[in-house]
Structure formats: C-alpha cells, structure tokens
Image (tube, rainbow, N blue to C red):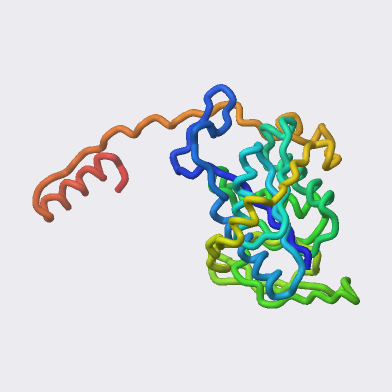
Amino acid sequence: MNIIVCIKQVPATTNVQIDDKTCTLKREGVESIINPFDEYAVEEGVRLKEKLGGKVTVISMGPPQAESALRETLSRGADEAVLVTDRAFAGADTLATSYTLAMAIRTVGQFDLIICGKQASDGDTAQVGPGIAEALDIAHVSYVRKIEQTTNKLDNPADNCMRVERMMEDGYDIVEVPLPALITVVKDINTPRLPSLKGMMAAKKAQIPHWNAEKINADKSRIGLSGSPTWVKKIFYPPPRKGGDMLSGEPQELAKKLVDKLRELKVI
C-alpha cells in the first residue's frame, strides 16, 4: 500500500505573534515542531505499512527549515520525504495550500491513501485535508478515530476500500470509503512512537528533495498570496473588558443583593 502523509511545521508555542504589516505569523526566532495532530497521521501511516506492506511518503509545504520536521518523520518510520518549497507559495490560504499539496501528490505518482492530521495548531481551520481530496477528486473522511479494515487487492484495485470510525459529537459513525481516499485523523487513533536511534541515523543521512512550483507543474494563478481568495486585511485585539461589580456579605444577603442588581439591570 502506497501511503502519503501530509504534515505541517508549526510554532512550538501557544503565544503566537502576528506581524501587523503582513498579517502573517512571526516565525523568526520561534522554535518549530511537527503539528501535533500530524504526528498521529505519520504513526498511522507507518502502522498500516507494517501491517500491509508498501511505503510511506511524507510531504510538507513550507520554507527550507521545514526539512527538519520531515527528517523527524523519517526517524519515526516513514520511507521517503519531499519538501514543497518556493517563494511563490508564500502567503497561501487553505485553498491555495490544498491545491499546491495536491499537485505535489500528483507528482509523487500512484497512491492508495492520504493521511492528514485533523487540523493545524496555528490555524485550526481543518480545511486543508478535505481541500486536497477535492482537488484530487477522491473520497475523504474527516475525524477518523479508528481504521477497522482495509482491503488492498493488487489483482483488482477497483474493489479496494477502507472501513473507518468517524468521530461525531454524540458517538461515532462507521464509514466505508473506496480507495484511493484521504482521511484526517484525531488523537484517539493511536499513540505516536518515539524516534529510534537507527531511524535518527538514517534520517540524518537521507536526501530530501525540494520541489518548486515548476517541478509540481502548478498553475501560478492558484498558488501563494495571488492565488488565495481569502486575505487577512486587519488584525486587532479586542478591547479589555471593564471590571464588574463585586458583591460581598453573607449568603442570604448576597442573594438579595444579586436579585436587586438583576432587577435594576432589567434581567428579571
């Protein structure tokens, strides 16, 4: 089974700073890590490979320093990695990012399954995974918490399918999807392994190709800031809330004061 996992390198902090002029994240001087949800995607890809055979190829779109995140996935069991990097990709929204990754996947070639984390910790949109599937015109299932069964017949690929559990607010759905397909996974699906010493040594020596817009045959009008239909025009912090009234006294007295205050405000 040929599996492709898409990952993103994100800031290793919740205290994200925004550039007031460009309205983009400030990444200079900020430690970066693999997006936490993508670690589960990598682990699930490696587990499927170990069970069914095949290979795992990890793809990331980002600046040259994102190569370090790809090397970490190699140390965790992935077989190959590709960095999609070009100044022309800068400023891409989720639609342009989905298109760019889809074109990179087409460049990789034949695949059976694409796995993504359910969302990125710096954007929280959960749009890129489904966007890739739509760009490739394949089926997709989001919020997958378990892969129940995978049918991978080499003699009759048209019958290949996967049955998964999709997390819902009130439980889960069981969904069967034809392959090739894309799934996005949640943290319930597995526990990511730590890099092995052998894996780290191999990852250090690995050659990771860098693909630009020309290499993936991308339409220049659909990538980067110019290919993004959504733009962040302004970022601002909401004004601080004004302090409210503090009531004091014994419980019975407090209850009376609270009722009087609510009546004064015409809440009751």
Residue 228 seen from this side: no
Coordinates of residue 67 in the picture (x, y in percent): 64, 44
Position above or below: 243 against 43: above
Q: Which residue is drawn at 22% across and 43% down?
A: 261
Going by the picture, which residue comes out furthest to the right? 155
Between 215 and 243, the residue placed more toward the observer is: 215
Residue 207 placement, left or right of 204:
right
Going by the picture, which residue comes out furthest to the left? 250
Q: Which residue is drawn at 59% across and 25% down?
A: 22
Between 244 and 157, the residue placed more toward the observer is: 157
Coordinates of residue 90 in the picture (x, y in percent): 68, 32
> Which of the 4 image quadrants contains residue 44?
bottom right
Q: Which residue is drawn at 56% across and 22% down?
A: 21
Coordinates of residue 83 in the picture (x, y in percent): 71, 44
> In what quadrant of the picture does the N terminus appear?
bottom right
> Which of the 4 image quadrants contains residue 4?
bottom right
Residue 9 seen from this side: yes
